[in-house]
Amino acid sequence: MTDNELLSPYITFTRRDWKQLRASVPLPLTEEELEKLRGINERISLNEVSDIYLPLTRLLNIHVANSQDTYKAVNLFLGQLTPKVPYIIGIAGSVAVGKSTTARILQALLTRWPNHPKVDLVTTDGFLYPNRILEQRGLMKRKGFPESYDLQKLIHFLIDVKAGKSEVTAPVYSHLEYDILPNQVQTIRQPDILIIEGLNILQTPKPKKANKPRLAVSDFIDFSIYVDAEEQDIRQWYVDRFHILCRTAFQNPNSYFHRYANLSEEEATETATQIWSEINAVNLEKNILPTRYRANLILKKGANHKIQEIKLRKL
Ligand SMILES: Nc1ncnc2c1ncn2[C@@H]1O[C@H](COP(=O)(O)OP(=O)(O)O)[C@@H](O)[C@H]1O
Ligand SMILES: CC(C)(COP(=O)(O)O)[C@@H](O)C(=O)NCCC(=O)O
């Protein structure tokens, strides 16, 4: 270890070192289960699952088991059963870096452990203000920025989950309609683990008054993961995804972006690059990247989406 590494709060692993940590993961995946993971993202490589995600689920399982032991010890101390409280894993990072894919792979793998079979996933998109309010406030070009989220609603949701409420609901965002769905909710019923995914989960709110600090989303997160990559790679993935959406989702007449359905290849690249530079790149630099070193774990991807380096916080 170099002096720099000794002084850093993180231990840094190469892909090769990290892979060894899979050690005794009792998780043999059948062909059928591997196919299911392909359904999450047909581009996910199976090496990625075994080299990166299996060691990661082993680490997470140790943390969850520790927290379940603490819960049992506290109940023993109190001499009564307190409501079951989900373990919360947060996944942060830029738009288009691969948060949703990472979250869904982790959900599928964590579900297979006997001590935490029920794993739910929510995204913070649902806590964006509806377009009606964003329009009133002139924030339609600021989706994803801190001011575009109803932070109070998100904090109350997390308070209820961590209070062990038997049913908690979260609002639902539709990428197709580019808006909150007014009559739909996602119901969370005391899962063993809740994964919360969103670009804002490691952000700290500005205090309203100097001496009145407010709760942050991260106050409720037991383990946080930041998915990281070079900005030029993320921009490319954003543009690639936009091309795919032009051929698929945008073809739907109900899509908010139906007007982009007939763009030529060049026009699609130009439009996506412009949205990226004007909105998502600014948000990444100003509001997302500065939160990276608050995470417990940083997964750094290379241009081919493969994770190249893993940083694990020592404490
Ligand atoms: N592990 C991966 N392997 C290959 N492609 C991936 C991987 N993760 C994400 N992608 C691709 O990158 C793009 C962004 O991923 P997504 O999960 O939608 O990101 P986010 O939720 O951060 O916006 C998508 O086109 C997705 O198919
Ligand atoms: C709604 C979002 C902020 C959420 O991002 P995600 O969690 O999917 O990474 C983002 O998809 C978005 O709409 N950004 C605004 C600019 C754009 O249309 O890409």
Image (cartoon, rainbow, N blue to C red):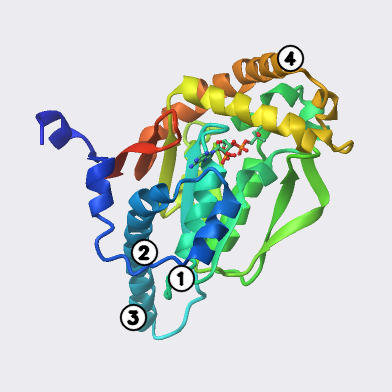
Residue 116 - label: 1
Q: Is residue 264 left or right of residue 106?
A: right
Crowding at mark 2 (Cα within 10 Å: few <14, some 14-19, many 20+):
some
Q: Position of residue 52 (x, y in %)?
A: 36, 49
Q: Is residue 164 visible?
A: yes
> Does the rendering let one see residue 213?
no
Rounded to the nearest angstrom, the CA distance separating label 1 from label 2 is 8 Å
Looking at the picture, does residue 290 appear above or below residue 174? Answer: above
Secondary structure beneath disc 1?
A: loop
Q: Amino acid at mark 1?
A: His
User: Is the Cβ of the residue at disc 1 closer than 8 Å to that at disc 3?
Assistant: no
First in sequence, mark 4 or 3: give its number.
3
Give the residue at x 38% y 71%. Answer: 68
Could you give the CA–CA distance between mark 1 and mark 4, rounded to whole angstroms?
Answer: 47 Å
Mark 4–mark 3 Cα distance, whole angstroms, equals 65 Å
Position in image of residue 281 (x %, y %):
56, 20
Q: Residue at x 58, y 56 (%)?
A: 121
Residue 34 in the image: x percent, y percent? 50, 59
Question: Which amino acid type is shown beneath numbered disc 2?
Answer: Asn
Mark 3 lies on residue: 77
Q: Which residue is mark 4?
A: 267
* Disc 3 residue type (three-letter): Phe
Instruction: Look at mark 2 in the image and give the residue it sits on.
Output: 61
Whether 44 is drawn above or below 85: the answer is above
Gap in Å between the C-alphas at discs 2 and 3?
Answer: 24 Å
The type of residue carrying mark 4 is Glu
Q: Is residue 148 left or right of residue 235?
A: right
